[in-house]
Image (cartoon, rainbow, N blue to C red):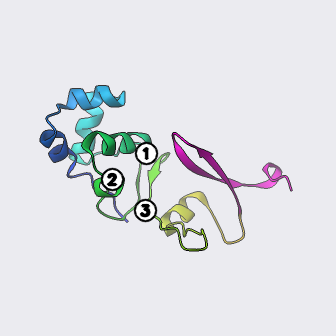
């Protein structure tokens, strides 16, 4: 799965923003915005959500392909679809990076402003 922000510059220009203005709205440097536009790095998920709002598009429109992209600490694995039973399938690369195996206990956290996070519980972390 790959993430492609190649349209970021086009959306920015279409909406009449400079890199400095986008950087200020997101609380990042202009250089960070430039790196995203050149494909040298990817924005964090909070920035992606803010960018979608600024440009008036959905997050999935900003993310075109399906390969995991990350810097060794933060990753974007793409989209997962919720089925009619409320289940999602985590992308293979996500499971590999975080060592998630069938039967593992996953803590689901939520913040109405920031979204949902999953945390793999291990050893003494698990209280049943």
Residue 105 vs residue 114, the one in the foreground: 114
**Residue 41 seen in render:** no
- Name the quadrant of the N terminus: bottom left
Element type at marker 2? loop
Say which of 66 and 57 sits in front.
57
Q: State whether residue 119 is above or below residue 35.
A: below
Q: Are marks 1 and 3 in contact (CB under 8 Å)?
A: no
**Image x and y of residue 19, in percent:** 20, 32
Residue 120 belongs to magenta span: yes
Q: Is residue 17 left or right of residue 45?
A: left
Q: Is residue 125 left or right of residue 37?
A: right
Residue corresponding to mark 2: 58
Q: In the image shown, does 53 or 97 lie closer to the viewer?
A: 53
Residue drawn where x is 22% and y is 26% of the image: 20
> First in sequence: mark 1 or mark 2?
1
Q: Indicate the quadrant containing the C terminus: top left, top right, bottom left or bottom right.
A: bottom right
Q: Which residues are magenta?
A: 105-128
> Mark 1, residues whose alpha carbon is within 10 Å: few (<14), some, or many (≥20)?
some
Indicate the quadrant where residue 29 lies: top left
Look at 63% across and 64% down and name the residue there. 100
- Residue at the image position 30 percent from the left and 25 percent from the top: 24
Residue 45 numbered mark, or none: 1
Residue 79: give its label: 3
On the image, the x and y values in percent for residue 41 come to 32, 45
Marks 2/3: CA–CA distance = 12 Å
Q: CA distance from mark 1 to mark 3?
A: 12 Å
Judge whether residue 2 is colored magenta.
no
Nearer the observer: mark 2 or 3; the answer is 2
The quarter holding residue 79 reads bottom left
């Amino acid at each position: 799965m790959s993430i492609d922000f190649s349209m970021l510059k086009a959306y920015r220009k279409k909406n009449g923003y400079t890199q400095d203005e986008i950087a200020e709205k997101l609380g990042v440097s202009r250089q960070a915005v430039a790196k995203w536009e050149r494909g040298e790095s990817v924005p964090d998920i909070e920035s992606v959500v803010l960018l979608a709002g600024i440009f008036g598009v959905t997050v999935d429109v900003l993310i075109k392909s399906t390969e995991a992209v990350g810097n060794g600490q933060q990753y974007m694995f793409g989209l997962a679809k919720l089925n009619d039973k409320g289940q999602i399938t985590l992308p293979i690369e996500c499971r590999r990076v975080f060592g998630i195996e069938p039967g593992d206990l996953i803590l689901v956290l939520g913040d109405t402003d920031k979204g949902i996070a999953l945390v793999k519980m291990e050893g003494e972390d698990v209280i049943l």
